[in-house]
Image: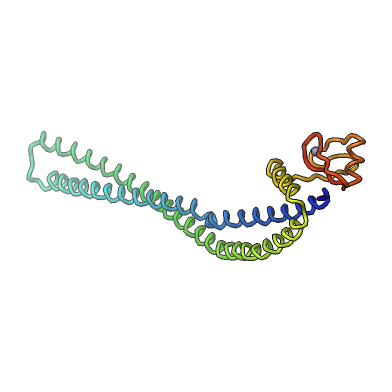
């Protein structure tokens, strides 16, 4: 007959296998993440785009300001070279020259703002580039660690699996099947220890008769509350 204690030992192997599998899955997930550089790389791309936009605006404003400056020089020439003497025309010219000068001032202010913006953006790009370099350096170390963990888990798993196989061979197939089904249904634990009259899985108190049956260890008793196979602790 298969005793609850044997099933409990089998479960210890299975839980060890679960831990190994989960550790491997975690390591693989972390490896797949690439070290978290992606988010920073995306931020850098976005910042580089901003910088490019600011530079384009700066170029456009500069070309525009250049046009206004030429216009201003031309108006000043017309105003002061003495060729135009009509006071009305001179007055109109003067007004236009003032307008152009105001426009130029606005353009220059805008150009300064854009230069500042570009500088800030360049600084942010440098910070992000540095951050990415740091992440890549740290990732080289971490990914090597993770690969080592994964490599070491494989023989560990094989060893536990082999030991489990030896034990499983000594158990009755029907008991084994019941155990497997129960383990699947109960989130990984089919067998629960009983300590001080309590099922350690669901913390329910066992009736005295049931507790005595568990203590004898000669038959399979299931917890009346959670359904797990009970094993005296
Ligand atoms: Zn229970």
Decide if residue 46 is on the left or right side of residue 14: left
Ligand 1 is in which quadrant of the figure? top right
Q: Residue at x 49, y 56 (%)?
A: 127
Q: Residue 46 placed where, x, y %?
A: 41, 49
> Residue 194 lies in what quarter of the image?
top right
Decide if residue 64 is on the left or right side of residue 134: left
Decide if residue 198 is on the left or right side of residue 120: right
- Foreground residue among 163 and 168: 168
What color scheme is it? rainbow
- Foreground residue among 115 and 28: 28
Q: Residue 168 placed where, x, y %?
A: 74, 56
- Foreground residue among 225 and 135: 225
Decide if residue 137 is on the left or right side of residue 61: right
Against 158, residue 229 (above or below) is: above
Q: Residue at x 14, y 35 (%)?
A: 92
- Foreground residue among 11 and 66: 11
Q: Residue 158 placed where, x, y %?
A: 67, 63
Q: Residue at x 26, y 41 (%)?
A: 103
| Tally of numbered discs | 0
């Amino acid at each position: 007959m298969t005793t609850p204690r044997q099933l409990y030992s089998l479960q210890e192997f299975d839980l060890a296998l679960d831990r190994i599998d989960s550790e491997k899955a975690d390591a693989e997930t972390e490896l797949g993440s690439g070290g978290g550089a992606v988010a920073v790389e995306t931020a850098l791309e976005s910042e580089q785009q901003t910088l490019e936009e600011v530079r384009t605006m700066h170029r456009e404003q500069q070309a525009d300001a250049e046009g206004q400056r030429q216009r201003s020089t031309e108006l000043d020439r017309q105003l002061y070279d003495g060729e135009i003497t009509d006071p009305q025309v001179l007055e109109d010219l003067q007004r236009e020259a003032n307008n152009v000068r105001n426009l130029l001032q606005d353009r220059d202010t805008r150009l300064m703002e854009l230069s500042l913006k570009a500088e800030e953006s360049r600084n942010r790009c440098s910070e992000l580039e540095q951050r990415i370099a740091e992440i890549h350096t740290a990732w080289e170390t971490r990914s090597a660690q993770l690969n080592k963990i994964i490599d070491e888990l494989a023989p560990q798993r094989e060893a536990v699996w082999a030991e489990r196989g030896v034990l499983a061979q000594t158990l009755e197939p029907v008991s084994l099947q019941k155990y497997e089904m129960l383990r699947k249904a109960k989130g990984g634990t089919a067998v629960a220890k009983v300590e001080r009259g309590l099922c350690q899985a669901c913390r329910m108190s066992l009736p005295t008769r049931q507790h005595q049956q568990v203590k004898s260890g000669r038959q399979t008793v299931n917890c009346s509350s959670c359904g797990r196979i009970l094993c005296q602790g």
